[in-house]
């Protein structure tokens, strides 16, 4: 076998072996708070570890993490929520001093192919406002339940008349 073809096959197998892959990283403002959405494709049921960090002045600052220790200045301002295929960083009271390159790093337990990393540059004046229902779309089971219960709610309203 040609060595170049052999290397290409190995790289393809390793890429397919990744237990998760970051699909998209986006940021928006929700009032005075920053939200960073890290969307991923998960190919395993293994627990997921994450790290959100920011690079400012050529130095990495860990904001919130299950991989390493978060810095004190972010502990009271940052929290993370996890939904199906979505990890969201919420940073309260976002100011221009919080601008920089934000990084989302994901790793599934027992995934020995390495961490998935994606970066986004965040500048306050260039951020869009978060769509009011974007997170709700991620988990639409409540919406389906509401739509299915509408006839029941209407029937109860009709009986009370």
Image (spheres, rainbow, N blue to C red):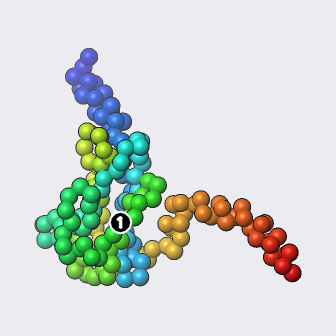
Quarter of the rendering containing residue 97: bottom left
Question: Does 157 sit above or below residue 25?
Answer: below
Quarter of the rendering containing residue 160: bottom right
- The answer to which of 9 and 50 lies nearer the viewer is 50
Q: Residue 70: x, y in percent? A: 21, 66
The residue positioned 13% from the left and 71% from the top of the image is 57
The residue positioned 40% from the left and 41% from the top of the image is 44
How many marks the image carries: the answer is: 1
Furthest-left residue in view? 58
Is the residue marked by circle 1 packed among few (<14), some (14-19), or many (20+) residues within 10 Å?
some
Residue 124 in view: no
Question: Does 71 sit above or below residue 108?
Answer: below
Which residue is identified by label 1?
80
Question: Does 38 sit above or below residue 10?
Answer: below
> SS at mark 1?
strand
Q: Is residue 64 left or right of residue 61?
A: right
Quarter of the rendering containing residue 140: bottom right
> In which quadrant will I find the C terminus?
bottom right
- The answer to which of 82 and 52 lies nearer the viewer is 82
Furthest-top residue in view? 1
- The answer to which of 57 and 61 lies nearer the viewer is 61
Furthest-front residue in view? 160
Residue 147 in view: yes
Q: Residue 153: x, y in percent? A: 76, 71
Q: Is residue 156 left or right of residue 122?
A: right
Q: Residue 81: x, y in percent? A: 39, 64
Q: Residue 41: x, y in percent? A: 42, 48
> In which quadrant will I find the N terminus?
top left
């Amino acid at each position: 076998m040609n060595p170049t073809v052999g290397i290409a096959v190995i790289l393809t197998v390793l890429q397919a072996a990744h237990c998760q892959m970051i699909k998209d990283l986006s940021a928006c403002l929700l009032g005075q708070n920053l939200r960073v959405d890290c969307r991923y494709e998960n190919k395993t049921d293994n627990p997921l570890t994450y790290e959100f960090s920011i690079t400012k002045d050529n130095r990495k600052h860990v904001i919130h993490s299950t991989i390493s220790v978060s810095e004190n200045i972010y502990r009271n301002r940052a929290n993370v929520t996890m939904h199906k295929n979505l990890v969201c960083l919420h940073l309260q009271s976002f100011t221009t001093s919080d601008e920089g390159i934000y990084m989302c790093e994901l790793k599934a337990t027992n995934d020995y192919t390495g961490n998935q990393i994606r970066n986004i540059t965040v500048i306050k004046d260039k951020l869009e406002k978060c769509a009011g229902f974007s997170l709700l779309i991620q988990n639409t089971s409540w919406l389906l339940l509401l739509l299915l219960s509408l006839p029941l709610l209407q029937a109860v309203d009709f009986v009370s008349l």
